[in-house]
């Protein structure tokens, strides 16, 4: 049925949440989360310095149950064992009779180098042992796709508590493997509407976008078990809902490769949504609307960084929140103060090192890369969805099974901290989201927006490990800080974007992301800025000029209003001179497929299915 619309927007009603005491885990010292009074969606109050506890809140505590012990290391037989000055175990050879040839020896076990011994000591296994199929003693393979599915189904089959657990087959990979999520909640049901009605915040935990980063999936299987009925973290579900995607790239995991089956990078496809994996994840986020999203990775210890700087990366964990132009300011601040800072303290208490994400830069001059600002990664795209969006990366994507228990331990400690932070800040988070939703919708037709940006230059002292000694040494490197962006190209914010009738692929992807798109029911005219090329190139190299005129709009074309909560996603996708935009990535075919609408259009629209 045709409807008349001049400035459409929509926003869900804000939710409130109250917390329960957070239980101690088997990993970290007991921490008590404070009870929060319910907060309504009102104008954003002064930035909270600390959460206020509800009367009578008491810290919770449980006694961790044993996880089993580490297998004892075999001791050398015969000759006495000593250690050299580097702490390396040495077994002396027995003396032989003079003039007699030495006996034929069994093949010697390779001697552990002093550097490796130092690394093993630095990254010692935790005092607990984690148990998943892929972490079994003597196992060479990581958890297979079949084992992962069986693990999730067994958890979903558990009974005897108020917790509901369901496996979601939310899509298929390029090779037809099910993409599976586990929903854990004490809401009335496990569908998105039930979780929303529970007035508890929802957290989405995402693992193994890159198939050669197995620790994230193993850690999420551990966390799923502990949140399920009978697990140590199950009481957290009195205060939040959790959706876990242990393995977003099952084809890559099966092949032991970083990329998807077609050779593309899933973590560069969260705006263009060209792969079925990215499309399925976008629909999952759209439907469940989590307040916090964590994308768990592993990073290579050596790799390009070693080749460029002759040094090994050091932290047990690196982290970064979304760093993308036009991101809601308060959600970025919430990520820093309410999530990253408590996570750093929790990791430090557990004896684990941490730092902001860093890697070797890609320029000819040696530089440090502190994280991208393009709207293509899960971290940055989800940061434009009015949610706290974090990326964590434990060390070791190039270590195979070396230090695997510690890598999983690091991930579990960081992810548990995220759950605690969500409970402790539930009311504050919903207030911030409510404010950001209204602010994003109100910016249509006014002010400026950033099309291209650059980080602020800085010099960073970085502690690395010397590959010859495994000792720490400092590096001083130039970098651009993605946390402090400088606009390179700004434009007036339009009221919305027009899309040509044949731009159905772009429309479909925008709707998967959660954007409202309207179809023009009757031809009309609108005031528009049309793009015209002023030079060659694509993406950020494309040069365009804007020509304002009264543009005829045909029926069956489309209008994407910016007066909606996810309007900044439309900016990222539809401005043509960005590297991650739909024109540069081929979702739109030509520059004339879109235009900027500079006044509220008086058009007749029809709702889309």
Image (cartoon, rainbow, N blue to C red):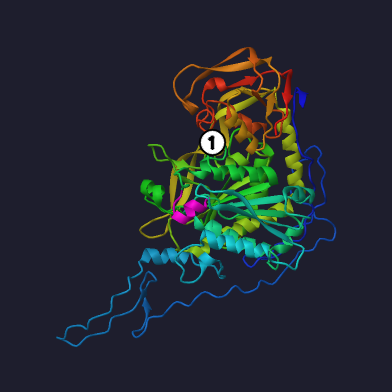
Residue 103 position in % (x across, y down): 22, 84
* Screen quadrant of the N terminus: top right
Q: Give the camera-side residue of 139 and 377.
A: 139
Which residue appears at 82% of the width and 43% of the height? 40
Position of 27 relative to 266 (above/below): below
* Screen quadrant of the C terminus: top right
In this view, the residue farthest toward the right is: 55
Relative to 106, 211 lies left or right: right
* Residue stretch in magenta: 249-258
Residue 379 position in % (x across, y down): 58, 43
Residue 522 position in % (x across, y down): 71, 18
Count of numbered tags: 1
In this view, the residue farthest toward the top is: 549
Label 1 neighbour load within 10 Å: few <14, some 14-19, many 20+: many
Relative to 328, 112 lies left or right: left
Q: Would residue 50 be seen by someone viewing this image from the given angle?
A: no
Position of 318 relative to 565 (above/below): below
Q: Quadrant of residue 449?
A: top right
Relative to 309, 186 lies left or right: right
Relative to 394, 13 lies left or right: right
In this view, the residue farthest toward the bottom is: 97
Q: Which residue does the numbered mark 1 point to in the structure image?
A: 374
Magenta run includes residue 580? no
- For label 1, the SS is loop
Which residue appears at 51% of the width and 62% of the height? 143
Q: Give the camera-side residue of 481 and 199.
A: 199
Q: Would residue 240 be seen by someone viewing this image from the given angle?
A: yes
């Amino acid at each position: 049925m045709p409807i008349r619309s001049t400035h459409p927007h929509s926003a869900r009603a804000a939710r409130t949440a109250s917390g329960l005491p957070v239980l101690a885990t088997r990993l970290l010292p007991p921490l008590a989360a404070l009870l929060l009074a319910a907060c309504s969606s009102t104008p954003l109050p002064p930035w909270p310095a600390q959460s206020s506890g509800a009367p009578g809140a008491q810290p919770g505590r449980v006694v961790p149950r044993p996880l089993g012990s580490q297998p004892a290391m075999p001791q050398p037989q015969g000759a006495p064992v000593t250690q050299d000055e580097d702490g390396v175990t040495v077994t002396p050879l027995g003396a032989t009779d003079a003039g007699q040839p030495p006996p034929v020896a069994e093949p010697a076990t390779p001697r552990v180098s002093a550097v490796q011994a130092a690394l093993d000591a630095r990254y010692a296994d935790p005092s607990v042992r984690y148990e998943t199929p892929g972490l079994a003693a003597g196992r060479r393979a990581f958890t297979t796709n079949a084992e992962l599915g069986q693990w999730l189904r067994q958890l979903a089959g558990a009974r005897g508590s108020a917790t509901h657990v369901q496996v979601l087959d939310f899509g298929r990979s390029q090779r037809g493997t099910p993409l599976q999520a586990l929903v854990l909640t004490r809401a009335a049901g496990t569908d998105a509407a039930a979780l929303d009605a529970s007035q508890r915040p929802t957290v989405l935990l995402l693992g193994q976008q890159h198939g050669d980063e197995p620790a994230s999936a193993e850690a999420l299987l551990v966390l799923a078990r502990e949140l399920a009925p009978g697990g140590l973290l199950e009481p957290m579900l009195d205060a939040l809902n959790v959706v876990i995607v242990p393995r977003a790239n099952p084809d890559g995991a099966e092949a032991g490769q970083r990329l998807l089956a077609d050779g593309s990078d899933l973590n560069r496809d969260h705006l263009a949504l060209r792969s079925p994996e990215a499309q399925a994840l976008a629909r999952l986020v759209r439907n469940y609307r989590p307040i916090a999203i964590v994308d768990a990775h592993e990073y290579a210890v050596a790799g390009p960084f070693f080749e460029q700087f002759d040094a090994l990366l050091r932290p047990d964990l690196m982290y970064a929140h979304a760093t993308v132009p036009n991101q809601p300011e308060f959600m970025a601040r919430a990520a820093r103060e309410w999530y990253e800072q408590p996570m750093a303290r929790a990791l430090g208490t557990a004896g684990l090192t941490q730092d902001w994400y860093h890697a070797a830069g890609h320029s000819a001059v040696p530089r440090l890369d502190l994280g991208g600002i393009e709207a293509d990664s899960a971290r940055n795209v989800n940061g434009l969805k009015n949610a706290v969006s974090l990326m964590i990366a434990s060390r070791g994507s190039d270590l195979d099974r070396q230090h695997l228990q510690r890598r999983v331990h690091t991930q579990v400690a960081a992810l548990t901290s995220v759950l605690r932070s969500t409970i402790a800040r539930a009311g504050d988070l919903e207030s911030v989201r409510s404010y950001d939703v209204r602010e994003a919708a109100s910016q249509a037709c006014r002010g400026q927006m950033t099309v291209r940006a650059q980080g602020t230059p800085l010099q960073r002292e970085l502690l690395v490990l010397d590959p010859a000694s495994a000792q720490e040494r400092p590096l001083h490197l130039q970098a651009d800080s993605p946390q402090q962006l400088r606009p390179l190209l700004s434009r007036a914010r339009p009221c919305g974007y027009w899309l040509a009738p044949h731009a159905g692929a772009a429309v479909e992807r925008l709707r998967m992301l959660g954007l409202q798109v309207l179809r023009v029911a009757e031809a009309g005219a609108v005031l528009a800025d049309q793009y015209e090329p002023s030079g060659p190139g694509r993406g950020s190299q494309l040069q365009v000029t804007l020509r304002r005129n009264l543009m005829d709009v045909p029926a069956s074309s489309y209008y994407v209003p910016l007066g909606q909560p996810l309007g900044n996603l439309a900016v990222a996708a539809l401005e043509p001179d960005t590297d991650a935009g739909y024109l540069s990535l081929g979702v739109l075919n030509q520059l004339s497929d879109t235009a900027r609408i500079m006044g509220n259009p008086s058009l007749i629209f029809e709702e889309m299915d």
